[in-house]
Image (tube, coloured by chain):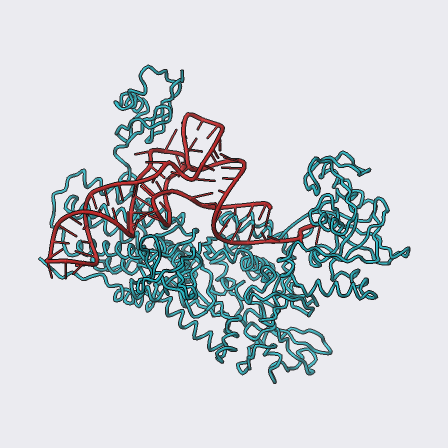
Chain colours: A cyan, B red
RNA sequence: GCCCAUGUAGUCCAACGGUAGAGACAGAGGACUUAAAAUCCUUCCAGUACCAGUUCGAAUCUGGUCAUGGGCACCA
């Protein structure tokens, strides 16, 4: 009887269900105090126009959790938006003569269209795009709140100037001395910058890392390192030139005050006032300083062995011995850390040692050691009249106490974390709402005239700042005196945009920047986003800034919670081998195959080079585009593949054949359920035992899938569902049709968060009128899940010798007796004296014998 | 150089300190088919990178080595 059963056709069923979900807003989330809330958040994408596999993985992980929590009865917030300001839009404007706004909005539309093909359960009514005035207007208002809190200031400062992007970068955006986006070596320039006082929260940002147990350890470590807290002594040297004593002292910071007697020279940064003073009448010093700054950090990093110094005419008087120490300008001294000057102890510091060796300066050991110098370990101090024999901790305390009592120094704590420079001399960003008036100085834009909107009619050429060169935009009147004034033309770092978007999601239409009642429901005191998911690349910057923002807004009374993200999951990258032909072009994985141990192009047989797995990218062709794969297999197959192939934190290696496996599994589920829907319990006579076994499997699977989802073990969750599928297939004709059908329905409910379209379709096909997304999560019956009998392992001296099958509720005595009686164990027990017996209920008996 | 993670069948991955194999990919054989694809059935394959230790018992814990990946790297 061939009933021409309908085949699994994702191209038809997926759009159908997506339409039904989004037409009726089933994922709409509104505050409801009668229900427990759960806020699932994935990092918002930059709208490049192209969705890539990393996004697909990220959003699928979040969607499983969101759908699961919804089924568990939580009121789930699961929003999505766009990190839509930034340089690529301007680069596109320069290259392709398209306006940044048009380019960005088109990209958003395109990406959103692609994203909707995946059936992710977003409440799209919460969508925000940071480039729209509805978003950046409120951001300007928040910026004014921070200003009122004293957290915003302006500072003339050396900044990292990116010569390609023609913009200023934050320290954090300089990677190995190069711009994090352009890759160009960074230069140093001095200009007035808008700063955010993140350092006011340094201690809290560090201490509260302990309140984040559900963050990956390594992320917390990275943040702690970034904050870089260190304790030491800050003290001053009297400075002389010849015999004349200078009015200003030389302030230095050291984490090793115990080595003070070993200090044989001092070094200052090229930007230090003393360096400037030395350069005033010395052209050589001037050229040394110029060289040190133009070299930039990039050169230094590449050529880090090259420590260079220039001797100044100044000397510093040692505070304990009165000895004059020469002062050098040194290229390795950072002006931004500590005081920009240091005391050098070549015997116990590697850099100082290298420098002293190069310039033949004295090296005085002050710690007893057999090790070659420089020795950085602990030990008894020598050559240190005040504290000979003490260790580092004791000696440090002695020096600090003496310095403080005599008033030439004090114990201080230094941090590596600097204030956050947010000024960008760019067009495509949030305008900073301030006005420069000659009479009144820097004046905030009145809140009632926000949003301060970007002008559309700009000419983007790639040089300079379009806001500055715009004919009219910056000219305005001073809100205080009504005189002629000009607007600030800097825009904000895009990390500002992503520092609070997770709050605006909760009230995207609010007239206030943030609606406290919505925030207090979704992000109450003591709990923020319940689960945040994103890439490890944001471990420091975005996450640290967001934590700072949350704390600052808390202190302004705008939010109640103190940490934005209660739990964090950093997913691994999606990587793949790349295949390169001799002419340098890259082939897709589907175009190559391995034959007799070598890789060749299928079409031509030409040999190709295989590069090891790296991040999937368009230029390397090492992975197909997500929408092409959706067209080929459907979203559910791609989702399942992403979940099944590797655990979330691990890198996921691209494999076309593994996708085929996911596709096949879904077809098996389809065929199984489809058959159950057409056969109406025409019965086989099932035995009680087979039914009980199948029922047990069903309940064990519910238990396993539930706990796997809770632990983000999505790969084993899928495996458990595959097992149940196998069991159900095998049970056809063996177990009762009613139970098989129940098993299939359970399977669909368990798989629904992972593959929502096919499960919804089959659920419907089985005659259910309540859709799966509105159904509750299955619960298991512990009695049904319990095994009747167990296989007990019998070990003798730790080695497996026999196994015995016993009732699950066997007593220890019976289990031991059975173990001793086991035939296979006999040869190993003959004539042995038993020393110890270990019984692990349900698992094993281990009989340890006395060795002769 | 420092810190962290990872290392299990040909491949991707499982395994509260307790039977190394749940699941999948690939391979082999078979069934169905005129044939192929699809589907279904059966099946081969490692002893957990290496060395030592703790333990009745180690893939799992500890120490060391190696490899891969990532982060930090003149922070005084």
Looking at the image, residue A321 lies above or below residue A436: above
Of the 4 image quadrants, the one containing the N terminus of chain A is bottom left
Task: Write down the quadrant of residue B43 in the picture.
Answer: top left
Pick out the residue farthest to the bottom. Answer: A471
Of the 4 image quadrants, the one containing the C terminus of chain A is top left
Q: Is residue A738 left or right of residue A116?
A: left
Query: What residue is shown at x 45% (from left), y 66% (from top)?
Result: A81
Tally the marks. Answer: 0
Task: Write down the quadrant of residue A396 in the picture.
Answer: top right
Query: What residue is shown at x 71% (from left), y 49% (from top)?
Result: A354
Looking at the image, residue A394 lies above or below residue A276: above
Pick out the residue farthest to the left. Answer: A1
Given residues A128 and A275, the one toward you in this image is A275
Given residues A185 and A542, the one toward you in this image is A185
Where residue A449 appears, x then y in whole percent? 58, 77
The answer to whether residue A739 is visible is: no
The answer to whether residue A233 is visible is: yes
Q: Is residue A17 left or right of residue B73?
A: left
Pick out the residue farthest to the right. Answer: A243
Q: Is residue A94 left or right of residue A761?
A: right
Where residue A803 appears, x then y in whole percent? 28, 28
Where residue B55 appears, x then y in whole percent? 45, 26
């Amino acid at each position: 009887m061939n009933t021409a059963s309908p085949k699994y056709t994702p191209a038809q069923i997926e759009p159908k269900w997506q339409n039904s979900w989004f037409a009726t807003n089933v994922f709409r989330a509104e505050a409801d105090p009668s229900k427990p809330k759960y806020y699932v958040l994935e990092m918002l994408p930059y709208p490049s126009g192209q969705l890539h596999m990393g996004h697909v993985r990220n959003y699928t992980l979040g969607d499983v959790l969101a759908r699961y929590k919804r089924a568990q009865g939580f009121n789930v917030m699961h929003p999505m938006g766009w990190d839509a300001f930034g340089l690529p839009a301007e680069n596109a404007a320069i290259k392709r003569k398209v306006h940044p706004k048009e380019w960005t909005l088109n990209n958003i539309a395109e990406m959103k269209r692609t994203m909707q093909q995946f059936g992710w359960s977003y409440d799209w009514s919460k969508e925000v795009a940071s480039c729209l005035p509805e978003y950046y207007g409120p951001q300007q208002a928040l910026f004014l709140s921070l200003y009122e809190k004293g957290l915003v200031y302006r500072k003339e400062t050396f900044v990292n100037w990116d010569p390609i992007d023609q913009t200023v970068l934050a320290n954090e955006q300089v990677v190995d001395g190069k711009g994090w986006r352009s890759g160009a070596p960074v230069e140093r320039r001095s200009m007035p910058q808008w700063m955010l006082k993140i350092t006011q929260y340094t201690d809290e940002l560090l201490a509260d890392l302990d309140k984040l147990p559900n963050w990956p350890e390594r992320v917390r470590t990275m943040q702690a390192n970034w904050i870089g807290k260190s304790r030491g002594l800050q003290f001053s040297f009297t400075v002389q030139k010849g015999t004349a004593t200078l009015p200003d002292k030389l302030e230095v910071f050291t984490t090793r005050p115990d080595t003070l007697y070993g200090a044989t020279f001092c070094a200052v940064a090229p930007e230090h006032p003393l360096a400037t003073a030395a350069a005033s009448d010395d052209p050589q010093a001037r050229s040394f300083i110029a060289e040190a700054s133009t070299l930039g950090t990039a050169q230094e990093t590449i050529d880090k062995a090259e420590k260079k110094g220039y001797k100044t005419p100044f000397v510093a008087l040692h505070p304990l011995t009165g000895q004059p120490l020469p002062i050098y300008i040194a290229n390795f001294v950072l002006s931004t850390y500590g005081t920009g000057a240091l005391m050098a102890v070549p015997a116990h510091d590697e850099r100082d040692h290298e420098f002293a060796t190069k310039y033949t300066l004295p090296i005085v050991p002050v710690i007893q050691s057999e090790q070659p110098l420089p020795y950085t370990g602990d030990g008894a101090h020598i050559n240190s009249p005040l504290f000979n024999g003490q260790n580092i901790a004791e000696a440090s305390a002695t020096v600090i106490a003496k310095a403080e009592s005599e008033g030439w120094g004090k114990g201080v704590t230094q941090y590596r974390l600097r204030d956050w420079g947010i000024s960008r001399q760019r067009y495509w960003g949030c305008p900073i709402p301030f006005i420069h008036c000659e009479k009144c100085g820097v004046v905030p834009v009145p809140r009632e005239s926000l949003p301060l909107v970007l002008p559309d009619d700009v000419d983007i050429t790639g040089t300079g700042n379009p806001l500055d060169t715009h004919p009219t935009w910056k000219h305005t009147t001073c809100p205080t005196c009504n005189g002629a004034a000009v607007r600030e033309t800097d825009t904000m770092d895009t990390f500002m945009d992503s520092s609070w978007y997770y709050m605006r999601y909760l009230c995207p239409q609010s007239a206030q920047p943030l609606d406290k009642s919505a925030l207090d429901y979704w992000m109450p005191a003591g709990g923020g986003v319940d689960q945040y998911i994103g890439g490890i690349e944001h471990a420091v910057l975005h996450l640290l800034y967001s934590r700072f923002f949350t704390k600052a807004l808390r202190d302004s009374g705008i939010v109640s919670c103190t940490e934005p993200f209660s739990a964090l999951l950093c997913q691994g990258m999606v990587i793949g081998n790349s295949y390169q032909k001799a002419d340098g072009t890259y082939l897709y994985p589907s175009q190559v195959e391995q034959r007799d141990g070598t890789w060749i192009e299928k079409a031509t047989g030409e040999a190709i080079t295989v590069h090891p797995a790296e991040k999937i990218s368009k230029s390397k062709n090492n992975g197909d585009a997500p929408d092409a794969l959706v067209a080929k297999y459907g979203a559910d197959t791609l989702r399942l593949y992403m979940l099944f192939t590797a655990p979330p934190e691990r890198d996921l290696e691209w494999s076309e054949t593994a996708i085929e496996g996911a596709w096949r599994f879904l077809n098996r589920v389809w065929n199984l359920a489809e058959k159950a829907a057409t056969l109406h319990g025409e019965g086989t006579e099932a035995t009680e035992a087979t039914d009980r076994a199948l029922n047990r499997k069903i309940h064990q699977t519910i238990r396993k899938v539930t706990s796997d989802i809770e632990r983000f073990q999505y790969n084993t969750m899928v495996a458990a569902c595959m097992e149940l599928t196998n069991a159900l297939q095998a049970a056809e004709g063996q177990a009762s049709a009613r139970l098989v059908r129940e098993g299939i329905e359970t399977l669909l409910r368990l798989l629904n968060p992972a593959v929502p379209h096919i499960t919804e379709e089959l659920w419907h096909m089985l005659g259910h009128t309540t859709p799966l997304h509105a159904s509750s999560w299955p619960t298991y019956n512990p009695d049904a899940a319990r095994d009747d009998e167990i296989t007990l392992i019998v070990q003798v001296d730790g080695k497996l010798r026999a196994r015995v099958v016993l009732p699950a509720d066997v007593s220890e005595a019976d289990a031991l007796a059975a173990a001793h009686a086991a035939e296979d164990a006999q040869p190993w027990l003959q004539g042995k004296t038993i020393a110890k017996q270990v019984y692990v209920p349900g698992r094993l008996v281990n009989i340890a014998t006395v060795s002769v």
